[in-house]
Image (cartoon, rainbow, N blue to C red):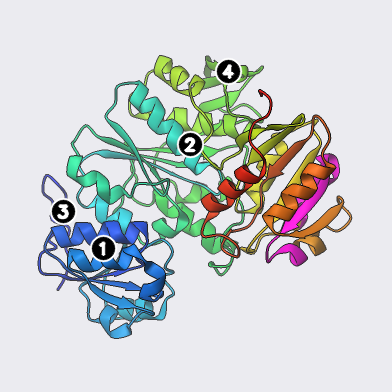
Amino acid sequence: MELERVETDRQEFPLAGRRVVVAGLARTGLAAVRFLISRGAEVIASDRRPEAELHDAADEARLLGAGLDLGGHTEARFTGADLIIVSPGVPLTLPAIEAARSRGVPVLSEVELAWRFLRGRIAGITGSNGKSTTTALTGAMLSASGVAARTCGNIGTPLLEMVEQDTRESVYAVELSSFQLEAISLFHPAAAVVVNLSPDHLDRYRDYGAYVAAKARIFSNQGREDLAVLNAADSDSALLHSAVKAPVKLFSSRGPVEEGACVRREEIVLVAGGTASPLIPVSEVPIPGRHNLENVMAAALAALHFGASLAAIRQAVRSFRALPHRLEYAGRLAGVDYYNDSKATNVGATIKALESFPGRRVLLLLGGRDKGGDFSTLRPLLADRVAMVLLIGEAAGAIERQIAGAAPVARCGDMASAVAQARAAAREGDVVLLAPGCASFDQYRNYEERGEHFRRLSGGVEEGR
């Protein structure tokens, strides 16, 4: 059966009676199963994990009426489908998917499927680091302005779950990973933001260029009525300019821009037509780090595109608090500040976390499952401000070789040992920072579990901040 996009009010295409395989049965996959079955599709839920490892997900899919293909991906199921919806964690290089694509079976991401049914507009936000914070800020700025805004996507709630309450007035601040962007075709954000670029997921992509190309897909369906937002202070973001079709606004924490936002004399300013107008003093941004100034600027430019007011943007920024596991203040113990940045799952994120503490002695917890990062790029910051690197997880040996001599190193093995050694070595005024630069899957189910473990081990808040 050939799938078409039918140009109706809801921009939808028919699903009733279609044979659809959902590849991956985590949060996004389950959302797709629910949505597809509610619209009459015949669904097979496929996951490489056996049923015993899926727990409630397999039971829910079965109760919904889906067939199950577990413990692997059966090629015949995929090649015999009318449509495949692929979850972010499932690579398009999966042999069953490649075989289906070679036979002309459409392969779409969950956000692409949602787009076919939505009437509202989308602010799409991606990047190597900071995209969750920028997405949350954008949603907060729009909501404070009275816009019917929802925050969703890779940050938490799948975009598909927005369809039932969708209206033409709705605006969705959607966090998008490179994995989600790989399988889009018509997905069209009215504003597309790339917060920054640095090497990530090189365990999945053949090289950095392939990763950048996936990110660039966010611009592929934009036109002159849309907005593209890029980071002028991030050299790698220049790699994206050739992919942009929409008008561009730039933001920079390091220098002036001709159109967009920048930092000038300790104040974030908006620049339009060469004229700068104040937005908010740097001192009133409650989340630490230069990178968070960039996140605020990127969010403000996106929110303004949808009609947010300057007063509401200021209000949203002043009341914003760090998201869990993103340079989150975990407390103070014996005069030492503990910060949980478990979401720092690549080297670029670790760099941004370290840059947030100029003039402070930092004890850095680093390691986990390597994603192909170049830890040698940390060496200047380690030499400048890190008193000790405490290594955990599978990547400890590789990291130690790459940073040898830049700072004292302790091979700790696990989080409990690392926090104990950090506590013993720290002195008043120091920062103990979890910014691991690696995935968590060697020792934890996800980065959230890793961050929560660090928070518990850090002992809670003894003194006010």
At label 3, the amino acid type is: Glu
Observer able to see residue 444: yes
At label 1, the amino acid type is: Glu
Q: Position of residue 235 (x, y in %)?
A: 63, 45
**Residue located at (65% from left, 49% from top):** 348
Circle 2 or circle 1, nearest the eye = 1
Task: Find residue 398 and report its image quarter.
Answer: bottom right
Q: Position of residue 231 (x, y in %)?
A: 56, 38
Q: Which mark is residue 60?
A: 1
Structural distance between the alpha carbons of marks 4 and 3: 44 Å
Circle 3 or circle 2, nearest the eye = 2
User: With 182 as the anchor, is 131 left or right in this view?
Assistant: right
Q: List the residue tagged with mark 2.
A: 134
Q: Which mark is residue 284?
A: 4
**Within 10 Å of the Cα at label 4, are there few (<14), some (14-19), or many (20+) other Cα atoms?**
few
Q: Which mark is residue 12?
A: 3
Circle 1 or circle 3, nearest the eye = 1
